[in-house]
Image (cartoon, rainbow, N blue to C red):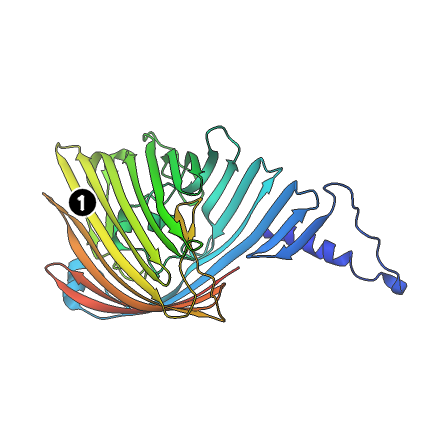
Amino acid sequence: MILPALLLMQTLSGLQQPAAGGLAAPEPSQGPGEDFEVYYRGGIRFEAADGSFKAKMGGRIQWDTAYIGNNRAIEAAVGAPLDDGTEFRRTRLYISGSIHDEVEFKAQYDFAGGAAAFKDVYIAFPAFPAGKLTVGQFKEPFSLEELTSSNSITFMERGLPNAFSPSRSTGVMLADDLDGRFTWAAGVFRDSNDQGMQVSDSELSATARVTGLVYSENDGQDLLHLGAAVSRRSPNGDDAQWRERPENHLSPRFVDTGVFASDESTLVGLEAAWVSGPVSVQGEYIQAQNQLVAGGDATFSGYYVEGSLFLSDGDSRRYDAEAGAFKGPEPAGDDAWEAKLRYSSLDLTDGAIAGGELTDVTVGLNWYMNPNTRLMFEVVNADLDGVDSTLIAQLRCQVTW
């Protein structure tokens, strides 16, 4: 994926170097579509002179390290040790682009697990009647925090209710935004593996989301976002399971329903976000109702409320009206500092299913050295209901291009 683009850059660079004997190399052809401009703007970009082809290359590196307080009671309850550790949380490369403004594409791969895993790999048709049609593997339209890139979320990990978010699946989706104020998206999906593949007799899942920008002023530095989403899901082989870590990827899962027999699951999510200059408040509530094979329902739920404050002048969270989600800030000065606080809770116990209840309180600080570099520090107090609590201190170094 990356090699052809690098060869292209080398070729274009060579055309501008003096030839042997001091003679200049011939100028590249100026015919329509035969010459490219190569430049950097949020990624390495290639663009045909007539605009018929555009491409962008980019990636991210996220390196994490964490200290996790030892607690024998929690270790016994979850059946795993609470060890300190370090990892590359994400190491991704991608290429995206458009062809004749009629077709868009993206191929993104993550190498953090030691092998190439599919992330966003899709083809889209932006001028499709009634909206933009996307086919391939990508995120289902569910949850404000899930649809905000990991490059731009306020905390290192998404809140506890993210246990219910479908994230990426393989499917077909139709979406549109109306006047930069409202968005809607709906699609049908199959659960897929790290290569975007699934072969089974499971039924399709259906997911839809709507959002509204109730008001937006001062170039988006003051806004109110509201949204709702629903997903109807059929697990493979009637086996369902919900589980989650305490907002630290190096920790074992503190709450876990175990595998249980369920015909269908219905997810309902509500979301809201308010931004006023440097101040931001965001929250979500997600409920998962499971229809049990043995009869009856088991209902689980979670929510979070988080706030942040930019300590540097002129900085604010940025909103993507087309996606109905947030994107990373661009420091108004040389850098930017952001203080943050979050309370989140997840309840995976109902009836005979005792998955546990977990509550987290997280406080931290983000340092945006520039638009492409961010350092994040957090302390998480994870309280496992009926057992005990422990402290987790974690740090992330992040670079994007």
Residue 271 on image: x %, y %: 29, 47
Q: Is residue 370 above or below residue 318?
A: below
- Name the image quarter holding residue 338: bottom left
Residue 367 shown left or right of residue 94 in the figure: left
Q: Is residue 328 above or below residue 170?
A: below
Amino acid beneath label 1: Phe
Residue 38 on image: x %, y %: 67, 54
Residue positioned most to the front: 218
Residue 81 shown left or right of residue 278 in the figure: left
Label 1, residues with CA under 10 Å away: few <14, some 14-19, many ≥20: many
Which residue is at a point 45% across and 56% down the rendered structure image? 114
User: Which residue occupies the foreground of this view, 247 or 174?
Assistant: 174
Residue 235 on image: x %, y %: 28, 36
Please state the total of marks drawn on the protein image: 1
User: Which residue occupies the foreground of this view, 365 or 82?
Assistant: 365
Q: Is residue 217 above or below residue 233?
A: below
Which residue is at a point 21% across and 57% down the rendered structure image? 254
